[in-house]
Every structure is written in structure tokens, then in C-alpha cells.
Image (cartoon, rainbow, N blue to C red):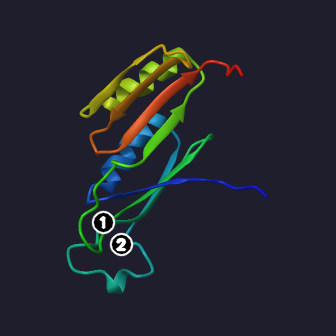
Amino acid sequence: MSNTLTTYFIFNGNCREAMTFYQKVLGGDLKVMTMADSPMKDQVPPGAENLVMHAFLQTPGFALMASDGMQGPPPVNGDSVSQALTVTNTEDAEAVFAKLSEGGKVTMPIQETFWAHRYGQLIDKYGMHWMVSYNKPMEM
């Protein structure tokens, strides 16, 4: 069996902005479908035409999916899940960490730890939690 786990973010009206930001930081190919572009366009409430029905960011190593939440209360982003992004060198770890933390909050500065050459935690400007690491070989 081959399984794939993909992160799916739900935003409160700023999905396109957030996913464009993630594409600038992480690279990859971004595809966005608005409510007006969808097969359900005739059922979209007035004023919701430009909300994102589905966004998909595909990179060589992972994918992110997202949409703008439309039903129920506004989403509360981030508190119980973190995105763990592993990179392959110190420079990439520091660069990605710096870019993701712009406008956000660093909760653990990027630094060397016993398990990683570089590891840091942050909450980005969209309220999403990230762990960025360049790991050392695991010894058991």
C-alpha cells in the first residue's frame, strides 16, 4: 500500500494571498480555483465569487491544499497542528525559516539542537504553526 498525507489549510478569506506566499517561500506549482470558476458557480452566495474553492501547491517533496472556509464559524488556525518541514542543508533551513516568519512570530529561534543542525518553530502571519529542520543522522 502506498499512502500520501497532504496538509489542507482552511482560511478566512485570504487563501489566495497565503498560498501565493507559501509558493514564494517554498516554490512549486500553484493552481487556484475560485468559487466563480467552479462547477457550483450558480450556487455561490453573492460576494463569495472570488473566494477560493480549492488551491493546490505541488512541490517535488510535498503538497499543500487549501480553501476559504464558507460554512459555519470562521476557522481558528494552527493551535493543534504544526507543519514539519525538513530541508537538506543549513542555508535552506535558515532561509525558509526567515521567510516563513516574516510578519509572524518566532516561538523557538532557529538553532542547532541535539537532533538537528538547525531547528526552529514559528507561527506565520496567517496563524499556521511551522517546524523547520535540517536533521542530524538519527542514532539509536
Residue shown at the point (55%, 49%) measured from the top left: 63
Along the horizontal axis of the image, is 105 left or right of 30? left
Q: Within 10 Å of the Cα at label 2, are there few (<14), some (14-19), or many (20+) other Cα atoms?
A: many
- Say whether marks 2 and 1 touch (CB < 8 Å): yes
Look at label 2 and name its amino acid: Met
Residue 117, disc: none
Q: Position of residue 6 (x, y in %)?
A: 55, 53
- Measured in 3D between alpha carbons, the distance from the residue under mark 2 to the one under mark 1, in whole angstroms, is 6 Å
Disc 2, SS: loop
Q: Hey, which residue is sitting farthest bottom in the picture?
A: 42
Along the horizontal axis of the image, is 2 left or right of 62? right
Image quadrant where residue 3 sits: bottom right
Q: In which quadrant is the C terminus drawn? A: top right
Q: Hey, which residue is sitting farthest left in the picture?
A: 47
Of callouts 2 and 1, which one flags the residue occurring earlier in the amino acid sequence?
Answer: 2
Query: Pointer 1: what residue?
Result: 51
Q: How many marks?
A: 2
Q: Position of residue 132 (x, y in %)?
A: 47, 29
Image quadrant where residue 9 sits: bottom left
Q: Within 10 Å of the Cα at label 1, are there few (<14), some (14-19), or many (20+) other Cα atoms?
A: many
Looking at the picture, tell me which residue is in the foreground, 138 or 59. 138
Disc 1, SS: loop
Q: Position of residue 126 (x, y in %)?
A: 29, 45
Residue shown at the point (55%, 19%) measured from the top left: 116
Residue 35, disc: 2
Along the horizontal axis of the image, is 4 left or right of 54? right
**Residue 33 position (above or below residue 127):** below
Looking at the picture, tell me which residue is in the foreground, 115 or 84. 115
